[in-house]
Amino acid sequence: MKIIIATQNPHKVEEIKEIAKLFNIEGIEFLPIDKGLSFNPIENGKTFEENSIIKALEANKLIKEYTLADDSGLCVEALNGAPGIHSARYADTPQKRIDKLLTNLQNTKNRKAKFICAMTLINPNGEIIFKTIGECRGEIAYTQSGTHGFGYDPVFIVDKTSKTMADMTEDEKNKISHRSLALQKVFEYIKEQLDLPM
């Protein structure tokens, strides 16, 4: 089975491949959208799910294959869910995004937060056949820690651990991350509902 990931970012595809390996998923070939194609979805949805659907449909128009899209971000309780769907655009660089987040939280003790990942699977006919959401709960640290991961990982302490996502190994993160939890549901759907070799 071939699944086109609605991205031209090879790192995201590699992460999905690693998660698939971790859960012994075989028989699925994950591929990015060819960089020669014009993939510029307008992410004007109001939720992660809406943006995920927009990306999946746009990718499916270009490539008539099974298409999987995700939209994800960080939601902080004390900031009324911000940065939310604007997580990647919260500031100009990853470090500036972390700095802005810590500055905005400097006067609050409520550090509760969650990473959310919404995924949409579309069949070759352009029909939405499965949608799901994965959540990883935790809290925002007061200072950065760790050298792994990306984005807000250095300041996100995972629930029931004392580690930020950036302190974790790739395998540790891939077992509990919001993307991993959403992907597991996608894999379960494919196994149970689609008459396809795995």
Image (cartoon, helix red, strand yellow):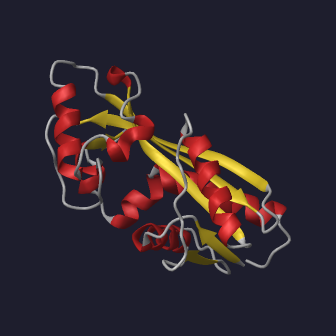
Please provide percent x and percent y for residue 12: 44, 66
Is 51 on the left-hand or right-hand side of 35? right
What residue is shown at x 28% (from left), y 21% (from top)? Answer: 110
Q: Position of residue 169 (x, y in %)?
A: 31, 64
The quadrant of the picture occupied by the C terminus is: bottom right
Vertical arrangement, residue 139 with respect to residue 26, above or below? above
Picture quarter with the N terminus: bottom right
Q: Quadrant of residue 105?
A: top left
Residue lying at the far front in this picture: please name it.
38
Residue in the image at 16% along x and 18% along y: 107
Q: Relative to 37, say whether 82 is above or below.
A: above
* Name of the residue lying farthest toward the right: 195
Q: Residue at x 18, y 49 (%)?
A: 95
- Dividing the picture into quadrants, the one containing residue 82 is top left
Q: Nearer the viewer, residue 56 or 196?
A: 56
Could you tell me which residue is drawn at 29 percent across and 50 percent down?
A: 153
How many circles with numbers are drawn on the protein?
0
Compare residues 88 and 162 and report the one nearer the observer.
Answer: 88
Q: Position of residue 117 (x, y in %)?
A: 51, 47
Quadrant location of residue 11? Answer: bottom left
Q: Is residue 195 left or right of residue 146?
A: right
Q: Nearer the viewer, residue 83 or 176?
A: 83
